[in-house]
Every structure is written in C-alpha cells, then in structure tokens.
Amino acid sequence: MQRTDFSGMACSIARTLDVIGEPWSPLVLRDVYVGLSRFDELQADLGISRKVLTERLNHLVEHGVLERRPYDSRPRYEYHLTEKGTELVDLLMVMVGWGDRWLAGEAGPPVLYRHHACGEISGVDLRCTHCGEPMHARDVDPLPGPGAA
Amino acid sequence: MQRTDFSGMACSIARTLDVIGEPWSPLVLRDVYVGLSRFDELQADLGISRKVLTERLNHLVEHGVLERRPYDSRPRYEYHLTEKGTELVDLLMVMVGWGDRWLAGEAGPPVLYRHHACGEISGVDLRCTHCGEPMHARDVDPLPGPGAA
DNA sequence: AGCTTGAGTTCCCTGAGGGAACTCCAAAAG
DNA sequence: CTTTTGGAGTTCCCTCAGGGAACTCAAGCT
C-alpha cells in the first residue's frame, strides 16, 4: 500500500489502485497470467525482493485477485488468477497497447497477441458496450453517479 | 520512480509503469483530464504532498504525457494532456470499469460516462482491432514479438 | 541423521513519501 | 515606491516501505 491510503476515495480509479497500484503488483499479475505461479519462479523472473513479493502476493490474495492453492503434500503453493483477477488482465492489455505504441521504439513490441476468434496478431480497442462505437477519452462526458461523495 | 527501475525490461507493461506506475500519477492524470490544471488545484483536490506533486508533474511532463503551459505574464502554469497523455486515459477508463464492477459495492459507481456517439450512459469493452470481436485475457495467446529480449 | 527444496521471515540500511514551513517572483494595492 | 497577495514551487525533518542477503521451517529423499 502506498503511504496515503486511496481506498476511501469515492473514485474507482483510486480503489483499483488500492488493489494493484503498488509497485510490482501489475508485473506479478502479468507473470501469473503467462503461467508462472510459484514463489521462487516469480521472485527469479521479476528480481523482486522476497519480502516484498510476500507482501504483494498476500495483498492480492486478500483482495481476491489471486488464489493460493497447495499443489503437494508438502507445504507448497501455487498462485492462480481468480475471475476477478482475470478481468484485471484487461488493464494489462491496454497498458501493453499504450506501451507498444509510445514506448517500444525501433525494436517494436516485445510481445504480440494472437486473437483466437480471428487468428490474427492484433491489439485491443475500446468500444462502447451499448453501441459498439469507439469510446475513448474524448468521446465521453463524465457525470456524477449514485456512489458519488 | 519505484525503487527498482522498470524501464529496462523488455515489457510494455513495465515500460508503461515506468511512466505512470508511481503512486498518485494516475490520479493526477484523472484530475487533469476532468479539468483541474493548476498546481494548487491538484494539490488541494488530491491531498498529495506538494513535494511529491512537483516530482510527479515533472516526471509526466518529461515523458510527454502532460504539457506545462504558462497562462499569465506572471510565472503561472497550467498542465494539460498531450496526445500521448490523452491516450493514457483509456487506461483510466478500464480501471474505472473494473473498479465499478468489483469494488463499488451497494452505493454504485461514483462516476458515470455518457457516450457522445449514442448518448447512453455506458462503459468500455475491449474489442479486437482486426475483427471487432471481444478480446480479453482468455481470448488471446501471447507470443514473442520483434522487440523481445 | 543429514541433505535438499520450496516458501517464506528476519534484519539492517537506504531513500521515497508526508507534512509543514519557507522562498521567489510579478502584479496589484496603498 | 513600498507593501501585500497569490500561485508555484523548495527545503527540511521524520517515518516507514523497499532492497538485499541471511536465516528458518517443514516435508521428503538418500
């Protein structure tokens, strides 16, 4: 958790940050998504301090994003995405889109994604759930909702 | 910047985090997006330390996400989103979607979005840029791209 | 009994974040 | 022309989170 606690703010961005806004958390999620699931695998792949990895994993499990599951009669555990966590991967996909576009440079994207439905190497676009037209920052007006402060 | 520098990793998520992964940065972006643009406005709205706000704004300007623009003959400045920054708001919209779904609780979403194209209160969905079908975590296979390590 | 392995804990050290007070600079007020 | 004001940071001190390496613990293997 950051020094200042965001969870009390009436803002879904702040609340989401309270769950995965700490440094390393999105990268832990990415690793679990691509199939790394054990403590030492994650630690080695990320180069994260073991202490911090423990904290992050506990935090993500507490918030229902990851599930801690034994895989042996010995005390051995694997971490897996829950439904809640799997939907967070959408966020990662949008991060990848932005990073690929603005930061990848000459070398190009480090990772590509093949879409099952069409078989093409592709990226994500944001569309309105109602009308299906593109929906970006300039295409909407924010207005207070029921849960406003 | 977090203790460990993510910018060297061959991963668009890590690189994106290097730009907006610090605590507060997404909230600064949100505030600028909704029209708060001056130092003291941002400081008061967020309750962030002035020192940290200075650091975050400088970092975001350096990375071309915000533009620092004088608005008076006196040394007064406003911060505005660049094109690069405006596209980052997509990320915030997806955060909002996830936070609304999983964290808003009884009270409901604090903020709603009206889509210009259809006039409806709506949310975003991720679609394939190629075929237009839904594209989520389970709908893709990642494979190494040209910029892989 | 001793070794190995996965999964954490513990400990010390550095440095980022919080908070409040201080500075700087140009225009407006007196 | 001196003083005030107000926006935009700076400075300083203090605490606590993150890095890193060593240590622990509980099975199973030899």
Image (cartoon, coloured by chain):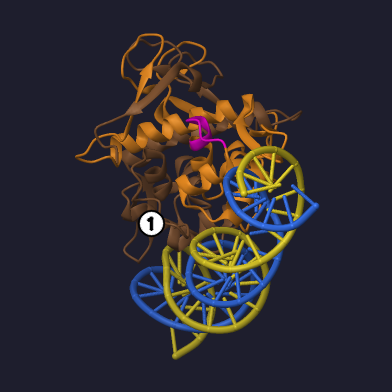
Chain colours: A brown, B orange, C yellow, D blue
| Image quarter (top left, top right, bottom left or bottom right) of the C terminus of chain A | top left
Q: Is residue C12 above or below residue A112?
A: below
Q: Nearer the viewer, residue B140 or A108?
A: A108
Q: Nearer the viewer, residue A117 or B26?
A: B26
Q: Residue at x 66, y 40 (%)?
A: B10
Image coordinates for residue B119, horizontal then vertical, percent: 34, 11
Is residue A91 shown to the viewer in this render?
Answer: yes
Queried whether the magenta region covers residue B74, the answer comes back as no
Q: Could you say whether the residue bearing mark 1 is in a helix, strand or loop?
A: helix
Chain letter for mark 1, please: A
Q: Is residue C13 left or right of residue B130?
A: right
Residue of label 1: A59
Q: Residues within 10 Å of mark 1 (few under 14, many from 20)?
A: some
Q: Residue at x 73, y 30 (%)?
A: A105
Quarter-of-image position of residue B81: top right
Image coordinates for residue B110, horizontal then vertical, percent: 31, 35
Q: Which residues are magenta?
A: B31-37
Q: Nearer the viewer, residue C24 or A98?
A: C24
Quarter-of-image position of residue C12: bottom right
Is residue A68 shown to the viewer in this render?
Answer: no
Q: Is residue D15 left or right of residue D7?
A: left
Amino acid type at mark 1: His
Q: Residue at x 53, y 52 (%)?
A: A23
Q: Is residue A77 above or below residue A12?
A: below
| Image quarter (top left, top right, bottom left or bottom right) of the N terminus of chain A | bottom left
Image coordinates for residue B93, horizontal then vertical, percent: 43, 29
Q: Is residue A98 above or below residue D4?
A: above
